[in-house]
Amino acid sequence: MSIKIHGKDYVQVFEREIMAGDNFVGSKTEVLLHSPVVIKVTVTTKKGIFEGISSANPTKAIEKQTPYEVAETSALGRALGFAGYGISGSIASADEMKKVKVAEDDVVED
């Protein structure tokens, strides 16, 4: 089930994993940087090998509390998107777009 954000449909990362199903062979997570946290996930499927990279924003509460988990989830979603799972015009997952929406909501205009 997709989530509508800014008028577009986005799929959550766990749904991309379900879509991959039996085609999913495995994944590997690498920490590229610790400050700020940058994670790369390499996904192996029967279609091939795909990579996704994401970072955590330390100014956001949830990302500050669990930066590795947040970045890893986004990177996994991107890798699965590059593999063709759960994309509808965008590689971004619903999880990533929620981060963007929260960041936008935090912006204070003068």
Image (cartoon, rainbow, N blue to C red):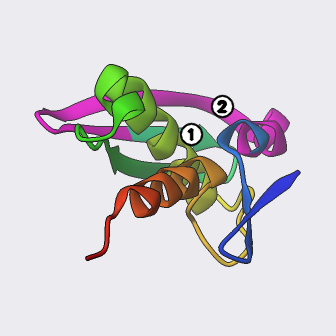
Q: Nearer the viewer, residue 98 or 96?
A: 98
Res. 71 in view: yes
Mark 2: which amino acid? Val
Mark 1: which amino acid? Thr
Q: Main secondary structure of the magenta part?
A: strand
Task: Name the residue carrying label 2.
Answer: 25
Q: Nearer the viewer, residue 77 or 49?
A: 77
Task: Name the residue carrying label 1.
Answer: 44
SS class, disc 2 = strand
Query: Separation of disc 1 and disc 2 at Cα?
Result: 5 Å
Residue 4 lies in what quarter of the image? bottom right
Provide residue 94's location: percent of width, then percent of height.
65, 53
Magenta residue span: 16-40
Do the numbered discs 1 and 2 sit on residues whose CB atoms are within 8 Å? yes
Is 103 on the left-hand or right-hand side of 108? Answer: right
Residue at image position (78%, 42%) is 15
Residue 60: mark in rendering: none
